[in-house]
Image (cartoon, helix red, strand yellow):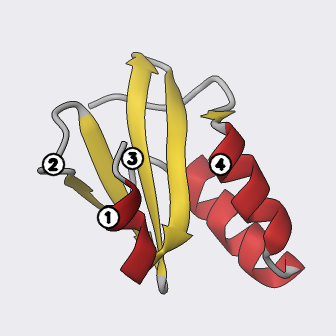
């Protein structure tokens, strides 16, 4: 099982979305990202190599860059994240 030991990289979209959130939601999402690979994670069927993390009504699409680091590709509300694609 992969473990995240290097801080994750964030895409421009992910950074921008986090800044738009209230501090409580932002911190909840960041805490969940730090705890990967624990959490509600499933493979993202639309794009091979990507995974989906559920945090309340938010969804986080990410992929492993290497054995120790992830790239956060998209963070958005559950109704919108799948429309954006990766």
Residue placed furthest toward the top: 66
Q: Position of residue 64 (x, y in %)?
A: 39, 26
Q: Is residue 75 above or below residue 24?
A: above
Q: On residue 46, which mark appears?
A: 2
x 12%, y 50%: residue:
45
| Mark 4 or mark 3: whose residue is earlier in sequence | 4
| Mark 4 or mark 2: whose residue is earlier in sequence | 4
Mark 1 highlights which residue?
Answer: 82
The kind of secondary structure element at disc 3 is loop
Q: Residues within 10 Å of mark 1 (few under 14, many from 20)?
A: some
Residue placed furthest toward the front: 83
User: Mark 2 and 3 residues: CB-CB less than 8 Å, in contact?
Assistant: no
| Mark 2 or mark 3: whose residue is earlier in sequence | 3
Q: Disc 2 and disc 3: Cα gap in Å?
A: 20 Å
x 34%, y 65%: residue:
83
Q: Position of residue 8 (x, y in %)?
A: 63, 33
Q: Is residue 32 left or right of residue 18?
A: left
Q: On residue 13, which mark appears?
A: 4
Q: Is residue 51 left or right of residue 65?
A: left
The kind of secondary structure element at disc 1 is helix
Q: Residues within 10 Å of mark 2 (few under 14, many from 20)?
A: few
x 16%, y 33%: residue:
48
Quarter of the figure with the N terminus: top left
Q: Disc 4 and disc 2: Cα gap in Å?
A: 19 Å
Q: Residues within 10 Å of mark 3 (few under 14, many from 20)?
A: some
Q: Position of residue 75 (x, y in %)?
A: 55, 59
In the foreground, 19 or 27: 19
The kind of secondary structure element at disc 2 is loop
| Mark 1 or mark 3: whose residue is earlier in sequence | 3
The kind of secondary structure element at disc 4 is helix
Q: On residue 37, which mark appears?
A: 3
């Amino acid at each position: 099982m992969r473990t995240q030991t290097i801080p994750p990289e964030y895409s421009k979209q992910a950074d921008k979305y986090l800044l738009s959130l209230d501090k409580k939601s932002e911190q909840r999402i960041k805490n969940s990202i730090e705890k990967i690979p624990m959490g509600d994670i499933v493979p993202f069927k639309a794009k091979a190599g990507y995974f989906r993390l559920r945090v309340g009504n938010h969804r986080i699409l990410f992929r492993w860059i290497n054995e120790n680091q992830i790239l956060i590709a998209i963070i958005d509300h559950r109704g919108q994240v799948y429309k954006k694609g990766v």
